[in-house]
Image (cartoon, rainbow, N blue to C red):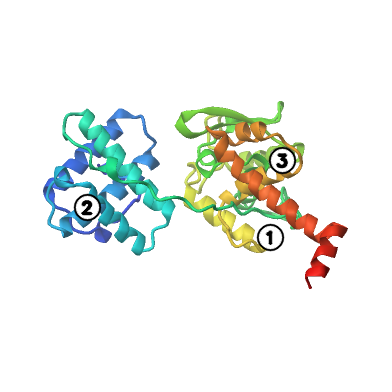
């Protein structure tokens, strides 16, 4: 389980006590997932965190075997997590982790029953993704002034590409120089389940990336097609936490929107495409969504914004408002 621990899921000083028998089963399960290579490291890390939390709770309750768990115990744990502040989405993920755990353990002839089948997932409330309004113009592709450092060019290129492509942070951190095709004006990303897709880029973003790469080569010698497109100080790919810091610093200066994570660029990219007439299926492919339902949430955002525009601008809407007053 060392590979998972190295991902920084939990510091050993932060974890609670776990019964040795539970810990052994958990460790063997994670090791088999890693050996199978079917799940991404981040997915395995999330599963390990959920199961570790569940194991700590079972230990506290005096339960020394996963096979002694029934649906009542699972419901009690999920209820406690909810009272502790977990959102419905987190509760659903934790239950899904347990279902997968028991499914595999039964498949591997380790367990005989699955206590999760009697437990229902909580319903998710409708949550519309926040995006940056078109009225708040994004100042992207800004050429750093004076004798700028590589980091200044890199940070500007990162936020520009996030909005120009709508890619996920995990996709951006894995980019190589060879993934960018300036001739065709597109970039290749490796999405969920290791699926590749090509994302077209606007001309302004292509031109700026070319300028950035010129500066990149000026600061780093011996770059190849396999070199990271965005490098950290050590020459390796930038990591998620660095991208989050870059995005937060940029958004704090540029918008009044509360959410300031890199994912805001993805939400904004999708919303702006739909508001400008892009077809839903096309946006689905650009975002790398597996189902249309994941993309349809942005149509609700667009319709909501159109309603706001109507209420402000349409004469009848104004008249109806005056009549209510």
Q: Residue at x 21, y 42 (%)?
A: 27
Q: Is residue 75 above or below residue 173?
A: below
Secondary structure under tag 3 reads helix
Q: First in sequence: mark 1 or mark 3? A: 3
Coordinates of residue 270 in the picture (x, y in percent): 65, 43
CA distance separating discs 1 and 3: 18 Å
Q: Is residue 184 above or below residue 102?
A: above
CA distance separating discs 1 and 2: 48 Å
> Which of the numbered marks, if any, corresponds to residue 73?
2
The residue that disc 3 covers is: 205
Q: Residue at x 69, y 48 (%)?
A: 302
Secondary structure under tag 2 reads helix
Quadrant where the C terminus is found in the figure: bottom right
Q: Is residue 124 above or below residue 311?
A: above
Q: Residue at x 54, y 52 (%)?
A: 126
The residue that disc 1 covers is: 254
Label 1 crowd (10 A; few <14 / some 14-19 / many >=20): some
Closer to the eye: label 1 or 2: 2
Closer to the eye: label 3 or 2: 2
Closer to the eye: label 1 or 3: 1
Secondary structure under tag 1 reads helix
> 72 or 215, which lies in front?
72
């Amino acid at each position: 389980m060392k590979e998972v621990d190295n991902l920084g899921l939990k510091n050993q000083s932060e974890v609670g006590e776990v019964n040795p028998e539970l810990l052994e089963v958990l460790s063997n399960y994670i090791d088999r997932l890693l050996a199978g290579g079917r799940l991404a490291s981040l997915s395995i890390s999330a599963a390990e965190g959920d199961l570790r939390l569940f194991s700590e709770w079972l230990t506290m309750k005096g339960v020394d075997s996963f096979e002694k768990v029934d649906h009542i115990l699972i419901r009690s744990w999920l209820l406690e997590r909810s009272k502790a502040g977990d959102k419905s989405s987190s509760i659903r993920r934790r239950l899904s982790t347990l279902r997968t755990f028991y499914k595999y353990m039964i498949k591997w002839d380790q367990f005989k029953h699955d206590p999760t089948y009697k437990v229902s997932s909580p319903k998710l409330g409708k949550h519309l993704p926040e995006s940056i309004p078109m009225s708040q113009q994004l100042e992207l592709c800004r050429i750093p002034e004076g004798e700028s450092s590589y980091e200044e060019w890199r940070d500007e290129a990162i936020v520009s590409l996030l909005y120009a492509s709508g890619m996920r942070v995990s996709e951006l951190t894995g980019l190589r120089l060879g993934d960018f095709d300036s001739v065709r004006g597109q970039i290749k990303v490796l999405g969920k389940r290791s699926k590749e897709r090509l994302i077209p880029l606007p001309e302004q973003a292509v031109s700026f990336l070319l300028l950035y790469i010129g500066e990149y080569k000026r600061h780093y010698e011996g770059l190849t097609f396999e070199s990271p497109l965005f490098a950290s100080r050590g020459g390796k790919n930038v990591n998620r936490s660095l991208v989050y810091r870059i995005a937060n610093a940029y958004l704090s200066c540029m918008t009044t929107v509360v959410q300031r994570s890199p994912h805001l660029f993805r939400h904004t990219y999708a919303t702006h495409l739909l508001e400008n007439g892009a077809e839903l299926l096309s946006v689905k492919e650009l975002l790398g969504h597996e189902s249309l339902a994941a993309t349809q949430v942005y149509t609700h955002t667009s319709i909501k914004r159109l309603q706001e525009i109507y209420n402000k601008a349409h004469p009848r809407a104004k008249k109806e408002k005056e009549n209510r007053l």
